[in-house]
Amino acid sequence: MADRTETEKRDLTKDLAAAVRGEVSSAAADRALMTMDASNYRRVPRAVVAPRDAEDVAAALRVCREHGVPVVPRGAGTSIAGQATGVGVVLDFTRHMRRIVSLDPAARTAVVEPGVILDDLRAAAGAHGLTFGPDPSTHSRCTLGGMIGNNSCGSHSVAWGTTADSVRELELLTYGGERVRAGRGTGPTGAPTGLPPRLRDGVKSLVDAELALLRTGYPDLPRRISGYALDALLPEQGTDLARALTGSEGTLGVLTEATVRLVETPAARVLAVLGYPDESAAAEAAHTLLPHKPMTVEGMAADLVGSAAGLPEGGAWLFVEMGGASPAEAAARAEALCRAAAADGTTGHAVVTDPAGQRALWRIREDASGTATRMPDGSEAWPGWEDCAVPPARLGPYLRDFRALLAQHGLRGTPYGHFGDGCIHIRIDFDLLTPPGIRRFRDFSHDLADLVVAHGGSLSGEHGDGQARAELLPKMYGPELVGLFGRFKDLWDPAAGLNPGMLVRPDRLDDNLRFAPLPGRPVPVEFGYPHDNGDFSAAVRRCVGVAKCRNEKTAAGSADVMCPSFRATGEEQHSTRGRARLLHEMLAGEVITDGWRSPEVHDALDLCLSCKGCRSDCPVGVDMATYKAEFLHHHYEGRLRPAAHYSMGRLPQWLHAAAPAAPAVNALARTPLAAVAKRLAGVAPERPLPALATETFTRWWWRRRRAAPPADGRTVLLWPDTFTNHLSPQVGRAAVRVLEAAGLRPLLPPTAPLPGGALPQPALPRLRRPPLCCGLTYVSTGQLDRARAVMRRTLDVLTPLLAAGRPLVVLEPSCAAALRTDLPELLADDPRAPRLAASVRTFAQTLEDFAPDWRPPRLDRPVAGQTHCHQHAVLGDAADRRLRERAGLTGQLSGGCCGLAGNFGFERGHYDISVACAEDQLLPAVRQSAPGTEILADGFSCRTQLDHLGDRPGRHLAEVLAEALGEADA
């Protein structure tokens, strides 16, 4: 049977490849990437096709019909009800069918292909003062085809409605190959236009026979998304076939082109934030704000918002956006709304006019679909009842009943969402791993469906029914109307070839759960995974598929890093989500069958820069750098490693050994022998070898100490990291100059424990032992046994020296991040590790915390450059920004990653991706900076990348301040 299945798959792939000009693949990696969307469900497809145009779609459908294989259209894969998963052929529209075919500002319409990303359409329309109204929180990566398939809405639906309100005409292909041009209106016979005769006559007959049912069977509310919108085919509704097909989840036809409506966007927007005692009070008030014509009425409670700045007093808040022809008009409208709301019992309000402040608050809302997947105690929460909706005036009573139902079932969740439309999002702490937990999930789903219907609501208020809710549609519509849905499906898709198991004759809501194939017990791993109770499967499960890592551009003013390799390649496997999916399938063992030896997972992780950006930018805190290190450890266990792992992974050893011969080594690096050395070491031939310091920082330090002991001051331990010590000692010397000027007493730790934890003395001879190490290069190459050994040695030396509360000042951000996170997570059994991690300070943090009254020299010049990705992700740069401000260094540093990323950009085969990452943000920011701008780059990798690719070198902030101190002294 298995052999026959493999043969059928090969034949299908062969025939598809012969018929389609786009990419066709049945490779394990490509199929694994498509097993899940952002829902609780998982299905394994037979093949993936990326069509180039409508003719390719037609060809793929023809081959699938011949083979009797179903088809699933897919956009960005952010659907949360399972409708973007399937067992047949997945049509991936994100690669090629992404054209904005035309845009007519006068008519306020655009013609788009299904793979167009919403933000791309909004940007094109924005040049004419227009926008596409619906804007789900995934607007930076979701596609128009997916939005039309799910009838997406977003936060501005109180102003501009759902996607169905913005669709004018759809071009589709049925599974049978019929071409459809669906719009609004009828022909001479009263049937919808744009249909082949079979469908034209069938649709008219069905509607004519069921007029009474269509007029009485649907609830009247703004967010009714569930089922097929067949009432749009009523004569009094204008026989709007395009509207009826919107939200059909790819079960009736495959979209190839759409004409959509654009709306005028206000010249100015202001955000009014209204505080309420609790979410019930906010829910009761939301619909009363609608007469003020707001653009949004979004609700969130304290358990989701946390300690966000800029919020008025309260336990829950409504975010109400008001527009105007000018900032003054928008602000006046917001103030008027706040006054009216105060009369109804707000606890306070704030009017946010600053665009940056508005973006910061909206980010909380947009990230909620990810952040809500973790409860305050760290336990997991899942979609499934993500967006049911009730009439807005019923939202308060519904939420109270909803909370009571959660308590009755022993469940927890954090409601938030579109309060003005009566639509609630929530992730609930279902146990979807055990049979009792799955039974509770099922029982709760049935009870909640009854509750929603009792309040006159819709099981889906935004993201469609998919598998999550379609089984329960008879509760909402009754068997007669659901039967009509089935007849409509059979008319359009008699072979049941389009997205079977969705909407009509659906799979059970507790079938095909994505967690079922995962190991029942935690797999043995090296890192502690403290936020996931040591369970690597739970860590991988963090990725719920919202795909923020698939952002192709960073938002204006954003310092985000994630995901540089995806932005460079545009390939799903090089996104954080794609890698998490492959790790999930590796653990499942069905598609990826080689476990830790998997070449598919290895290839996907090979282009992971270990930038750690996902650790902070992913709404659920996926930490792919750690997962990569874990994988590489197991993948190469007992096997020969790549040459780069030995050369660059063990860089601290090589640099320590080469230090006495630095001049000779540097001379050899300028000869033809360097090319041979790079080839043997696995180094990219395009990369110059960095010059070794002829005097290391530690040698300079001990020479200086013997000549002139430091003055008194509060003692701080200065970490002599490998890069500062051997490759850029000028940074260390500058840091000493600044720290001493600030009244601190920097001391270097010894290389071995001193008796009683004594501090190193000026007369102490320079020890010949290898220097201390944070283990960074060993971790990044997955040499975790060696990393653990060097980290334990570091703990042995530093623990007694830090007992008095002394800070450990680390100049290299990547080393600081390794000591702060990698060390305690790799040495989870050592109680000394968290104490050392807590002592780590960056250069700027040290000055702020231990020399708060020191005034840096004024430089009064602009800055450009990049915040180190590890600092952004692990340490934060708030202290650096404040220090720069006090020194008169103005402007913002860019986000992203420099692309060198330690060993990554030096490794053979990574050069082009490394350059592409640098061109994403760093190099353009430097090129566009004015003459006289100070180029800041605290990381050795960032400075090296600028040296290799730019024409303006970067400096550590310590160097800039030390130079100014020298000028002042002179």
Image: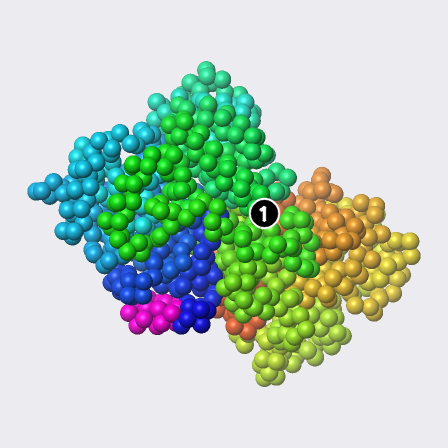
Secondary structure that dominates the magenta span: helix
Instruction: Choose top left, top right, bottom left or bottom right for residue 755.
Output: bottom right
Residue 194 point in image, percent of width and height: 16, 49
Residue at screen point 14% across, 51% down: 197
Q: Mark 1: which secondary structure?
A: loop
Q: Is residue 455 above or below residue 741?
A: above
Boundaries of the magenta span = 8-25
913 vs 329, nearest the viewer: 913
Asked if residue 17 lies in the magenta stretch, the reply is yes
Question: Label 1 is placed on what type of residue?
Answer: Thr
Does residue 88 appear left or right of residue 704 in this picture?
left
- The percent position of residue 694, horizontal first and vertical second, equals 72, 71
Rendering coords of residue 862 (x, y %): 53, 49
Asked whether the viewer can see residue 502, the reply is: yes
Residue 234 located within the stretch drawn in magenta: no
Name which residue lies at 33% across and 34% down: 478
Classify the position of the N terminus by image quarter: bottom left
Give coordinates of residue 606: x percent, y percent. 54, 66
Q: How is the image coloured?
A: rainbow
Badge 1 density bin: few <14, some 14–19, many ≥20, Cα 10 Å: few
The image quadrant that residue 943 belongs to is bottom right
Q: In the picture provided, is 170 more to the left or to the right than 626?
A: left
Q: Which residue is mark 1?
A: 434
Left or right for 160, reference 669 = left
